[in-house]
Image (cartoon, rainbow, N blue to C red):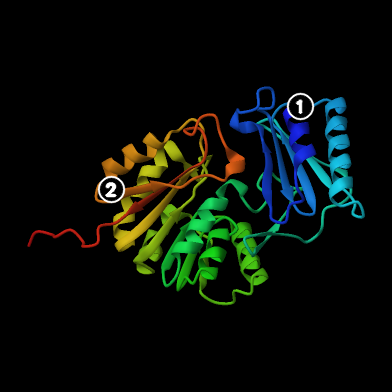
Amino acid sequence: MQPLLDAIAQMVRPVDAQRVFHGRGGLFPGCEHLALDAYPPAWLLTAFAPMSDAELAQVHDALTARWAQLAPDEPLNWVFQRRDGHRTETRLMVGSVPEPHVVSEDGASFAVHLLQGQNHGLFLDMAEGRRWVRQQAAGQKVLNLFAYTCAFSVVALQGGAKQVVNLDMSAGAIAQGQHNHALNGLQSGAGFLSHDIFKTWGKITRSGPYHLVIVDPPSFQKGSFVATKDYARLMRRLPELLRPGGRAMLCLNAPELSVDFLQTQMAEVAPELAFEQRLPNPAAFADVDAERSLKVLIYRAPEVPPRTEA
């Protein structure tokens, strides 16, 4: 566990929400089960294997010592979450977590919740994807599929998007997405639909075409989306959803599926879309194998629609 303790000893005081230690990337042997995130003013340690009380005490001592150097007049707040694939145990180890808890990223504000569930309201590994969307969004009409808490929508509107349509089957996530817009003073420009994407194509298509379509589904969520069988169904729809020259942003966070999985399926079901680039992941999420890490691919529709036979 020494690499984690070393990272804590060297960390700086965070302003934005961010990952501090990414053992999951495999670059620190023996720490593959550990991740430490900053959600100011709280820290979150996530373990994907059991940790002893003695190990937790070591982490506590390291955090206490470093926080005394970084913010001697402020209390230490940290949360431990243990995941074993079937259940999740979350414990407030010391201090408190704000309620409501709002964090920042590049000047945007997002509500998060560390003490419930595995998804805390903002996926930190997607920070570079959000920056790219903000940079590309000016004047654009955006479709945000599997919108979750609508972080892409917030940054798109901050980047000057003309309109964003957010769609997610979870009414709770959409409600939090609306709250995120309010936190950022975004009173117009966004629409919110709480529907099953595969049952809402008519409404989605009528609202188009779009300059940018963001596809960020769960890799496996029973009853909602299974990447190995459902991703191609989404790709097949992209040509009719995109304006000429429009772009699609395809995201996949499944270690067992490579970039080739996405590229092969796209070549089969939507060959007219041209691959442009793979976006980098945040440096804090460096991985010993890039194929196992988050994959974010950008595709572009042809500038001129293909001619149809008379």
| Quadrant of the image occupied by residue 173 | bottom right
The quarter of the image holding the C terminus is: bottom left
What number is the disc on residue 29? none
Q: Amino acid at mark 2?
A: Ala
Local crowd size for mark 1, using a 10 Å CA cut-off: few (<14), some (14–19), many (≥20): few
The x and y percentages for residue 59 are: 83, 34
79 w.r.t. 5: above or below: below
245 w.r.t. 17: above or below: below
Residue placed furthest toward the right:
73
Identify which residue, 155 or 13, lies in the foreground: 13
Q: Is residue 264 visible?
A: yes
64 w.r.t. 156: above or below: above
The x and y percentages for residue 25 are: 59, 32
| Quadrant of the image occupied by residue 262 | top left
| Quadrant of the image occupied by residue 231 | top left
- Label count reads 2
What number is the disc on residue 2? 1
Identify which residue, 291 or 261, lies in the foreground: 291
Q: Are dots 2 and 1 in contact, CB under 8 Å? A: no
Local crowd size for mark 2, using a 10 Å CA cut-off: few (<14), some (14–19), many (≥20): some
The quarter of the image holding the N terminus is: top right
Instruction: Kindly identify the residue that appears in the image at 63 percent across and 74 percent down.
Output: 185
At numbered mark 2, what does the secondary structure look like: helix, strand or loop? Answer: loop
At numbered mark 1, what does the secondary structure look like: helix, strand or loop? Answer: helix
The x and y percentages for residue 48 are: 69, 30
92 w.r.t. 166: above or below: above
Identify which residue, 20 or 82, lies in the foreground: 20
* Residue marked by disc 2: 270
Q: Earlier in the sequence, mark 2 or mark 1?
A: 1
